[in-house]
Image (cartoon, rainbow, N blue to C red):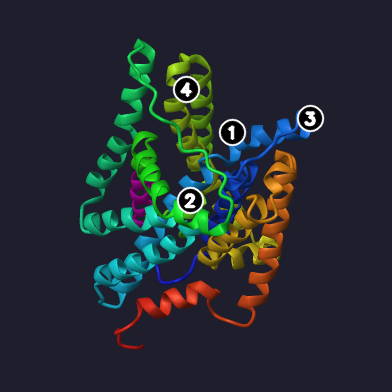
Amino acid sequence: MAGSQRIKSIDAVRATALLLILLAHCVVAYGAQHVDGDGAADSVAWWLFNYVFLGNGFLMFSFLFGLSFFFQMDHAEAKGIDFRGRFCWRLVLLLLFGVIHNAFYRSDILMIFALAGFVPVLYHKVRTKWILLACVLLLVQPVPLMEAVQRYVGTWVEPPHDPAVDPASLWDAMRDNSTKWLVWKAQYQWDSGRLFYTLAMFMLGTVTGRLRIFEQPRARHLPRIAAWGAVFMAVMLCVEAAVPDAFHGYVQNWRQVATVCCFIPLLAWLYDRPCLQSLLRPLYSVGRCTLTAYITQGIILTLLFFRYGLGWGTSTTAADRVLIGLVFFAAQTAFFTWWLGRFKYGPLEGVWRRLTRIGMKQG
């Protein structure tokens, strides 16, 4: 069956990924100066940050980007349309959204996705086995691996850390975010390996779409896939505990990939259960409005945490900030549920769609 029907469980998984990204950013106060308590609640918050929030939401989003790319191409090809050119224009628009969001929040991922998103267009007609091979090679993450080896043998020279800033005004923040922070972001994407496994997850998402894993009858295998992902994750946890300190960062990247290989099929299967459909309807709404949700999170929460706003970064603990994130996400969920009861698309999603379709024949 052509991928013309929206899979609600994927919308719910997308909303979950957005929540994990939100909570990871909240723990570190969206990059603002912050304080932390020493109680049990803070210890739990930081454990969740390290093993549940950190990296996992981003990787899930990357996977879902590749999957969505396949769905859009599949839907267009079912109508006899080559959507690749239009998808490139869509990426240009996403980049503009990212530039605006990045001015408020320096760790914006939309710009990264927009630029890396041209790669799926290049491999769209490539055979699946070659895409999988490229995926595996990218997951090797050569730059972080070389860094780990150099750390182990003692030849590693620590580069300058990200510039610590505490802008006095919103204008200062927007200026710095749009200039020197862009250089740091590009360097971080390469050095950390984030760029490699972003592209790898794009490819894995596209291949999963080609194999119709989330469509019946193959969707019944999702629990088995999740179980294998859990085994992979357990192995990586053991390896992470056993390897020398120099390799912890490198193995952590693999552990995050393993976690996502468990999370996505498990959540997709769980969210597709008939008994949960009514309960999950608000989550589906967030999943259909992730562009609006993500951008508003970055703009509003930086105003809450930085000193040019309310300065909550230094007046809250990590546990407090997790609670703030959860309350904010609940408010967004209520709003998007209300909005989609009246409109077909989210606020920015509607703008993005209309701009994407400029010059296209209607129908």
Determine the residue positioned at 71% across, 48% down. Answer: 312
**Mark 3 or mark 1, which is nearer the start of the sequence?**
3
- In this view of the protein, can residue 1 be seen by the observer? no
Between the C-alphas of marks 2 and 1, the distance is: 21 Å
Residue 211 sits in which quadrant? Answer: bottom left
Seen in the image, is 134 located left or right of residue 62? left
Q: Looking at numbered disc 1 in the image, what kind of residue is underneath it?
A: Asn
**Mark 4 or mark 2, which is nearer the start of the sequence?**
2
- 203 in the magenta segment: yes
Q: Of discs 2 and 1, which sits in the foreground?
A: 2
Seen in the image, is 336 located left or right of residue 345? right
Q: Looking at numbered disc 3 in the image, what kind of residue is underneath it?
A: Gly
Q: Nearer the viewer, residue 206 or 118?
A: 118
Give residue 272's position: percent from left, percent from top. Answer: 59, 58
Determine the residue positioned at 51% across, 52% down. Answer: 220
Range shown magenta = 198-210
Q: Of discs 1 and 3, which sits in the foreground?
A: 3
**Mark 4 or mark 3, which is nearer the start of the sequence?**
3
Q: Of discs 3 and 2, which sits in the foreground?
A: 2
Residue labelled with disc 2: 106
- The extreme bottom residue here reads 362
Q: Looking at numbered disc 4 in the image, what kind of residue is underneath it?
A: His
Give residue 184's position: percent from left, percent from top. Answer: 39, 42
Q: Of discs 2 and 4, which sits in the foreground?
A: 2
Give residue 93's position: percent from left, percent from top. Answer: 37, 69
Residue labelled with disc 3: 39
Between the C-alphas of marks 2 and 4, the distance is: 26 Å
Q: Looking at numbered disc 2 in the image, what kind of residue is underneath it?
A: Arg
Residue labelled with disc 1: 50
Between the C-alphas of marks 3 and 2, the distance is: 30 Å
Which of the numbered marks, if any, corresponds to residue 248? Answer: 4
